[in-house]
Structures are given as C-alpha cells and as structure tokens.
Image (cartoon, rainbow, N blue to C red):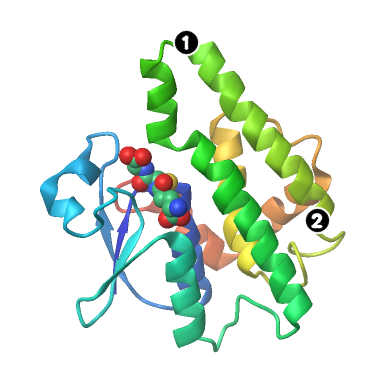
C-alpha cells in the first residue's frame, strides 16, 4: 500500500497510527501542503478534493478520507482491532473520533486558516480562533475518556488514533493541555508506544531536517 501523507497533517497521522498499530507495511508518498502540491493536477487525480491522506491499495484502487481509510483497515485487518467487541464501546470510540475529526480538526485545517487570513484576520485573531475550537473540543473529550490507560481501555484504539494527533496539533498551536489531565495521561502513554512513535510527525520521510 502507498499512503499519500504530509508529515504534520493530523489526518495523515491518524492513518499512520492505525497502520502501525496493525503492523501493516506501506510506502510513504509525501505531498507537500505548504508548496501546494495537493492542488496540482497529478494529486487531484488521486484525491479530487486536494487533501491528504489518500491510501493506494495494492490493486491500484485509491481510498480517501481518514475515517473511511481507517474503517477499511479495521474491516480488512481485524487481527489487531481498533474497536471493542461491545457495540456501546464501539459507539463511544466513534463518538470521540467524530468529535475530533468532524468538529475540531476541520476548523483549523490550513485552507480554513488561509481563508480567515485572506478575509483580513490577523495572526492573533487566527490564533484565537484555533485555540477556541481546540479548547472547546478537547474539554469535552476530557470528560468522555477514562481515568486509566488509553482513552477507553488498557489497549490503544480508535479514540486514541484520533486524540494523539489532535494533541500534537494543540501543542503545535500552543494550546496548553494543563486543564486536561486525562488527555495528558493518554498522550504520555502513547509517547512510549512504538506504533505511535513510528507514526509521529517528527520521524517521517518528509519531516524537515
Ligand atoms: N476529513 C478529511 C480531512 C483531510 C484534511 O483536511 N487534510 C488536510 C491536512 S490534515 C489537508 O490535506 N489540507 C490541505 C488543504 O487544506 O489545502 C480526513 O479526515 O481525511
């Protein structure tokens, strides 16, 4: 498989974690979002929306959208499951994933921030926008996760696949995690896990030196 990815894209980071947790090999196909490669015709032929990630399967078929890609991996490679057997726990994990993937991340995506800038908002206003949405969302996540281990149990799962990249984005945008001890605990735990370490933005082929 080939993963079209950008080192600090949180959506790509999610898929990298899922692939690593499941022990699946893939080739990284870096797309430089700062250079606008996602809007070039060659990449639009892969994802007409011009976003990463995209996953090319071994038969050449291409999947887009991190949620759909992770669901595909879960269905095809269930040996290391990201979802519990219990339907309620599955729904809780999907709820946290949707909260982050639908209600936090899209509001600080690069194209949204650039639209704010072209509308005349200065960097302080853009920063306030980012911090407001991340803080509101992570405050809710803090109440939805448990007091021990990963978000919803002793093993990492779908909620962690979404939360750890969102924590990375919070730190990148200088949003303090101090008010959220459970989230901080999960992030610290993930730091010591080889799959999360392998997927981290700091050690991707396109990570700047
Ligand atoms: N809902 C999509 C979001 C994908 C997305 O917004 N990716 C960002 C990077 S995290 C991107 O490619 N941005 C490029 C742009 O906005 O031009 C997913 O989960 O895959």
The front one of 106 and 12 is 106
Q: Is residue 65 among what the camera can see?
A: yes
122 vs 154: above or below: above
User: In the picture, residue 79 is in which quadrant?
Assistant: bottom right
Residue drawn at x 77%, y 67% is 152
Residue drawn at x 47%, y 12% is 121
Q: Is residue 107 left or right of residue 37?
A: right
SS under mark 1: loop
Location of the C terminus (image quadrant): top left
Residue 125 % position (x, y): 55, 14
Q: Is residue 79 left or right of residue 139?
A: left
**Which residue lies under the disc numbered 2?**
144
Residue 140 % position (x, y): 77, 46
Residue 30 % position (x, y): 26, 52
Residue drawn at x 66%, y 28% is 132
Residue 3 % position (x, y): 31, 64
Find out if the beta carbon at label 1 lies less than 8 Å from the nearest ligand 1 atom: no
81 vs 5: above or below: below
Location of the N terminus (image quadrant): bottom left
Q: Is residue 174 among what the camera can see?
A: no
């Amino acid at each position: 498989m080939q993963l079209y990815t950008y080192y600090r894209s949180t959506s790509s980071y999610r898929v990298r974690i899922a692939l690593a947790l499941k022990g699946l090999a893939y080739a990284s196909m870096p797309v430089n979002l700062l250079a606008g490669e996602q809007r070039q015709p060659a990449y639009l032929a892969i994802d007409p929306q011009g976003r990463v990630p995209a996953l090319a399967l071994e038969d050449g078929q291409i999947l887009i959208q991190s949620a759909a890609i992770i669901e595909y991996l879960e269905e095809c490679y269930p040996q290391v499951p990201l979802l519990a057997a219990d339907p309620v726990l599955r729904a809780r994990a999907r709820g946290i994933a949707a909260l982050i993937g639908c209600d936090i991340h899209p509001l600080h995506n690069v194209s949204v921030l650039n639209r704010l800038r072209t509308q005349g908002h200065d960097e302080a206003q853009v920063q306030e926008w980012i911090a407001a949405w991340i803080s509101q969302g992570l405050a809710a996540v803090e109440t939805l996760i448990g007091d021990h281990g990963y978000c919803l149990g002793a093993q990492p799962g779908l909620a962690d696949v979404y939360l750890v990249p969102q924590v990375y984005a919070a730190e990148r945008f200088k949003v303090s995690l101090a008010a959220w001890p459970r989230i901080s605990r999960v992030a610290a735990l993930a730091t010591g896990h080889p799959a999360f370490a392998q997927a981290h933005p700091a050690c991707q082929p396109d990570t700047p030196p």
